[in-house]
């Protein structure tokens, strides 16, 4: 860990005052260096990148603090609570909904010096690690010891495990290993008033409500997660990729449903709809078209082989044709490319022209509603965007997630691009709520979806969450503007991030 | 170093501006392998943060304190090259950015200590040299392996010459932003190497600069060249050390197999490290810009090394020096190999 506690940076009188005060308190490394403040001005929410591209000055935090222990984090939150200073957690900055975007006058609490791997319990299959550790770093460490977390989101190289927990992330192998909240068996956190919290790892419990669940998905609005006990798995001895062509998306969905409901748990099930297949996988399916299904079965060799065989039987029953391992291996090799492809669009003079708009939207719904959700959201996005791609992934016995990628070509008009972006989000969120889907499967709410969370939760849910927030954070300092908890309606159109 | 320019011209940055702009829209998937970002937690130290600041400097037309803080936060380890799908070479990005910062008078204090020093070839190398030989051995200003190289060359029966005058290849000057100074040093050296058919360079950092960045096809790194000579060396077996992959050799030059072949030739298949785990924090002037950060990177490197009861071997002289300072028994590849020369070989040490 960095042996440095001296404050860094210059800046305004307000910054100097906060820096001096925090350094005196012993909250960790404190910086008001302009380079750090600028670098914490945005996460990977495309709208913030579009605003920056348009020449807008993004809000920067007043200071950045890197606590190195739960006690330092506790002192920071106690100070912030007493002073009414907003605290915005920042892990890897890989979130895509503005969950780590600062608000005026805030202190960014960067978790990346909380990065120790405390212990690996190979008997229980649990690893204890601090929240600022980057996902890939933990996975590499586990892999060297014959274990895996099984959590492989496209952001694995950038995001912290605390960020995964705060946003209830899902990895590409979640169908087998679960979403991130399923991996969290215990956690350590600091509540908004600075109170430390340690919920020890338990395989299951009926001792009262699931308090850890309050913090998972709360995006830092109810406190800061500082460490976790995570379920780990022996690294798979065998990995069997295979691809199929399904005649229609609905046939593919039916096959996936039956696979899950028969108790199979392939690591990857990824069904592209006809549009995504034509745009991105035409070579794989050939002239016949249809929908590409990528699968990966993994684990103990005999079980993986059996699972692959049973999976193939269900896919064939719904008209699926074998495409072999090639397209699945190709997908595995490029499975983290999404972010780079988004950058190709977002950058000035990008592949869709100047001032293009691009984003992704993931929802989930029960199997019964899924075909209608697919149709409604595709239509909603297509009304505002030039490109709409979709695949189903993250499958469960009772439903699955749909992941949309959408983009609008640019003609140099930044204001028009932002308006199309806002209109597309408004349309797709309304469509999701109307069709019975959740508004987010694994990216979270942040600022982007804040105004739709109330409708998602319903009146009772909204009241309950509001009361929890009021009880835990009466000063309203914990990541304000996120989840719509403080009345903020930051969204795709005005974001509150200006 | 060059004097500060009053307007701090940004011409050096313009060539790297488009790549910097592109990177700033990417989702920093290289973060997990960046040793500086990991050790310091600094967002501005990620390749994304560095390139974002370069792009911002170009937009506003000036370099600032923020530019200086960002662009000097790179050790040149190139660990970011593996996950980067844009094919970015970060040292190539930061060198011109540092030149602009230096020209604007905003470079970190103490940077001059990180510049390259003109040194003459080691006396042991000079003593074994054959004037006019087709192969010229160039150790670089940080290598202390002159005696070991001389012993190995003698054992392999290779005639070589050296540059007797004090010279510097200029790489370290260019690294810290003194582009003109570095080029002048490199030009001077090139003149002195004019008659050579082959230039064997001990420090892989210098080899990368002279061979790839300057485009001299005669340049070979010493590890690759020694690996080709290994059948001519009678080497004793012995316990295996930990191999530290030198950043400039492994990722800078793409030389991965040669050091392994050399160690294996001496019966010592080395322990392997993860990609990018070997940065000791000493490259490209970073210790001058952020001494505490450089120490934190070194601490991470030491923590990542497996147990090394038989020492650590590295082709990087800076890494050897820093690992020794951290209490490890680190030696250069040539030093280690010379220690494995069988008794009776010219120059072989009498005992391990």
Image (tube, rainbow, N blue to C red):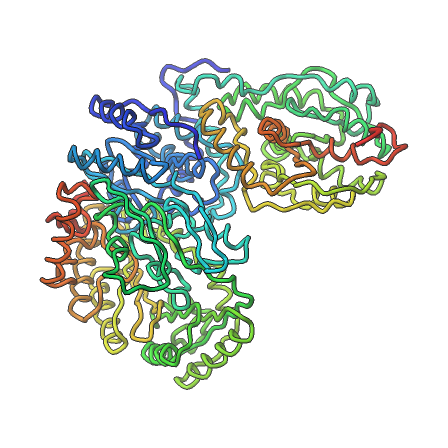
Residue, x 34% and y 41% (percent of image)?
A: A111
Q: Number of marks in the image?
A: 0
Residue A57 makes an appearance in the image: no
Q: Is residue A444 left or right of residue B155?
A: left
Residue B188 in the image: state x and y as whole percent. Answer: 64, 19
Q: Is residue B318 above or below residue A374?
A: above
Residue A407 in the image: state x and y as whole percent. Answer: 29, 57
Residue, x 35% and y 79% (percent of image)?
A: A261
Residue A461 in the image: state x and y as whole percent. Answer: 14, 61
- The one of A255 and B169 positioned closer to us in this rendering: A255
Q: Name the image quarter holding residue A186.
A: bottom left
Residue A152 makes an appearance in the image: yes
In the displayed orientation, state which residue is furthest to the front.
A207
Q: Name the image quarter holding residue A376.
A: bottom left
Residue A78 in the image: state x and y as whole percent. Answer: 22, 36
Q: Is residue A307 above or below residue A206?
A: below
């Amino acid at each position: 860990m960095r042996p440095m506690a001296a404050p860094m940076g210059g800046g305004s009188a307000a910054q100097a005052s906060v820096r001096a005060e925090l350094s005196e308190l012993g909250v960790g490394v404190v910086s008001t260096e302009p380079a750090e403040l600028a670098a914490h001005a945005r996460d990977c929410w495309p709208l913030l990148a579009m605003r920056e591209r348009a020449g807008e000055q993004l809000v920067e935090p007043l200071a950045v603090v890197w606590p190195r222990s739960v006690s330092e984090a506790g002192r920071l939150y106690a100070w912030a609570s007493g002073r009414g200073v907003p605290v915005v957690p920042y892990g890897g900055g890989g979130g895509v909904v503005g969950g780590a975007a600062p608000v005026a006058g805030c202190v960014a609490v960067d978790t990346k010096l909380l990065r120790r791997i405390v212990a690996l319990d190979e008997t229980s299959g649990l690893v204890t690690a601090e929240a600022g550790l980057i996902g890939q770093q933990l996975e590499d460490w586990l892999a060297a010891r014959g274990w895996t977390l099984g959590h492989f989101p496209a952001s694995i190289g950038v995001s912290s495990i605390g960020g995964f927990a705060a946003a209830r992330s899902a990895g590409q192998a979640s169908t087998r290993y679960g979403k991130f909240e399923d991996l969290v068996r215990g956690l350590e956190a600091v509540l908004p008033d600075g109170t430390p919290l340690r919920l020890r790892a338990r395989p299951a419990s009926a001792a009262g409500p699931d308090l850890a669940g309050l913090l998972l998905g709360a995006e830092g609005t109810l406190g800061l997660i500082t460490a976790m006990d995570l379920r780990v798995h022996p690294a798979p001895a065998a990995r069997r990729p295979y691809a199929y062509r399904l005649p229609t998306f609905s046939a593919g969905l039916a096959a996936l449903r039956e696979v899950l409901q028969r108790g199979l748990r392939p690591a990857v099930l990824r069904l592209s709809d006809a549009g995504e297949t034509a745009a991105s996988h035409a070579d794989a399916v050939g002239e016949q078209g249809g929908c590409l299904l990528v699968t990966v079965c993994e684990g103990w060799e005999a079980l993986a082989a059996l699972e692959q065989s049973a999976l193939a039987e269900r896919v064939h029953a719904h008209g699926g044709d074998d495409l072999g391992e090639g397209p699945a291996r190709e997908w595995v090799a490029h499975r983290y490319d999404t972010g780079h492809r988004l950058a190709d669009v977002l950058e000035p003079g990008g592949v869709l022209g100047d001032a293009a708009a691009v984003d992704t939207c993931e929802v989930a719904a029960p199997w019964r509603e899924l075909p209608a959700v697919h149709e409604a959201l595709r239509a909603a996005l297509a009304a505002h965007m030039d490109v709409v791609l979709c695949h189903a992934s993250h499958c469960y016995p009772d439903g699955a997630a749909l992941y949309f990628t959408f983009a609008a070509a640019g003609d140099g008009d930044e204001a028009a691009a932002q308006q199309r972006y806002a209109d597309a989000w408004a349309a797709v969120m309304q469509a999701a709520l109307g069709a019975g889907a959740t508004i987010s499967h694994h990216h979270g709410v942040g600022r982007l979806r804040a105004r739709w969370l109330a409708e998602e939760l319903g009146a009772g849910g909204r009241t309950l969450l509001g009361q929890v927030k009021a009880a835990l954070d009466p000063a309203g300092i914990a990541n304000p503007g996120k989840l719509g908890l403080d009345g903020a309606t930051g969204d795709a159109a005005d974001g509150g991030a200006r | 170093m060059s004097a500060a320019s009053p307007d701090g011209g940004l011409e050096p940055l313009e060539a790297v501006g488009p790549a910097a702009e592109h990177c700033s829209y990417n989702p920093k998937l290289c973060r997990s392998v960046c040793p500086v970002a990991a050790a310091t937690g600094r967002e501005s130290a990620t390749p994304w943060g560095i390139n974002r600041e370069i792009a911002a400097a170009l937009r506003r037309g000036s370099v600032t304190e923020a530019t200086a803080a960002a662009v000097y936060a790179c050790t040149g380890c190139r660990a970011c090259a593996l996950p980067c799908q844009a094919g970015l070479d970060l040292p190539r990005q930061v060198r011109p950015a540092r030149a602009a910062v230096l020209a604007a008078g905003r470079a970190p204090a103490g940077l001059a200590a990180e510049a390259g020093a003109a040194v003459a070839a080691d006396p042991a190398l000079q003593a074994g040299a054959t004037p006019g030989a087709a192969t010229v051995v160039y150790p670089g200003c940080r290598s202390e392996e002159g005696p070991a190289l001389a012993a190995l060359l003698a054992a392999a029966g290779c005639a070589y010459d050296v540059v007797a005058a004090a010279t510097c290849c200029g790489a370290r000057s260019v690294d810290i932003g003194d582009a003109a100074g570095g080029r002048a040093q490199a030009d001077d050296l090139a003149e002195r190497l004019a008659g050579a058919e082959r230039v064997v360079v001990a420090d892989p950092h210098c080899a990368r600069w002279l061979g790839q960045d300057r485009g001299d096809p005669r340049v070979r790194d010493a590890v690759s060249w020694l690996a080709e000579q290994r059948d001519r060396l009678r080497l004793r077996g012995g316990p295996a050390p930990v191999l530290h992959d030198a950043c400039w050799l492994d990722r800078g030059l793409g030389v991965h197999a040669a050091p392994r072949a050399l160690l294996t030739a001496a019966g010592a298949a080395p322990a392997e490290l993860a990609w990018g785990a070997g940065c000791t924090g000493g490259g490209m002037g970073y210790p001058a810009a952020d001494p505490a950060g450089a120490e934190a990177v070194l601490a991470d490197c030491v923590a990542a090394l497996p147990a090394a009861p038989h020492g650590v071997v590295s082709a990087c002289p800076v890494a050897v020096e820093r690992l020794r300072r951290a209490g490890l028994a680190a030696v250069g590849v040539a030093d280690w190999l010379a220690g494995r020369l069988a008794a009776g070989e010219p120059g072989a040490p009498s005992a391990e």
